[in-house]
Amino acid sequence: MCTDIVSEINNNLSKNNGFPFYNEPIELNDKNFDEKIKEVNIAIADFYGTWCHPCRVIEPMMYKLAKKYAGKIMIAKINVDKNPNLTFRYNIRSIPLVIVFINGKYYEQYVGARSLYFYDDLIKQLIEKYDKN
């Protein structure tokens, strides 16, 4: 069974031109953020707090979107309480905050919880414009 999973991952990587294949949000932190965010063309970073109700509302949406767009984008989760350097760097004052990165560079941000349809449409537009696969 384990070899089947490894084969599937390798198969997906080869289909994805070597880019990492993320089918669920990946937890990033102050130490690995810069490296990981550059691994993909399009990254959606969800800055959240465990105590934040709107953050908990959008969390299942991010899981759905990560599955739907696996191999096309990375959805990252960053806990603002555990990652003060990133919180300071991006001047985060309100959460949830979703920041879009294109080729590892800040592109735009959205404060507050939005609908699944909003995020889905946003990702479709980003893929159409920036996906190189």
Image (cartoon, rainbow, N blue to C red):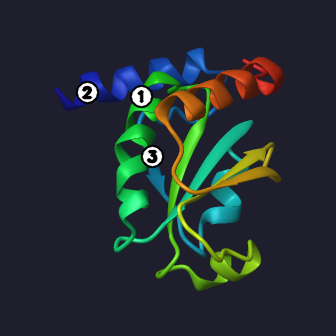
**Hey, what amino acid is under mark 3?**
Pro
Q: Secondary structure at mark 2?
A: helix
Q: Residue furthest left?
A: 1
Q: Earlier in the sequence, mark 3 or mark 1?
A: 3
Give left or right: position of 11 versus 20: left
Q: Residues within 10 Å of mark 2 (few under 14, many from 20)?
A: few
**Hey, what amino acid is under mark 2?**
Thr
Q: CA distance from mark 2 to mark 3?
A: 23 Å
Q: Nearer the viewer, mark 2 or mark 3?
A: 3
Query: What residue is disc 2 on?
Result: 3
Q: Quadrant of the N terminus?
A: top left
**Rendered image quadrant of residue 46:** bottom right
Task: Return the residue nearer the eye: 50 or 21.
Answer: 50
> Measured from the top left, where is residue 74 in percent x and y?
58, 40
Q: Which mark is residue 67?
A: 1
Q: Residues within 10 Å of mark 3 (few under 14, many from 20)?
A: many
Q: Residues within 10 Å of mark 1 (few under 14, many from 20)?
A: some
> Measured from the top left, where is residue 17 in percent x and y?
67, 22
Query: What residue is disc 3 on?
Result: 25
Q: Residue at x 25, y 27 (%)?
A: 3
**Hey, what amino acid is under mark 1?**
Lys
Q: CA distance from mark 3 to mark 1?
A: 9 Å
Give left or right: position of 36 versus 89: left
Q: Residue at x 35, y 71 (%)?
A: 50
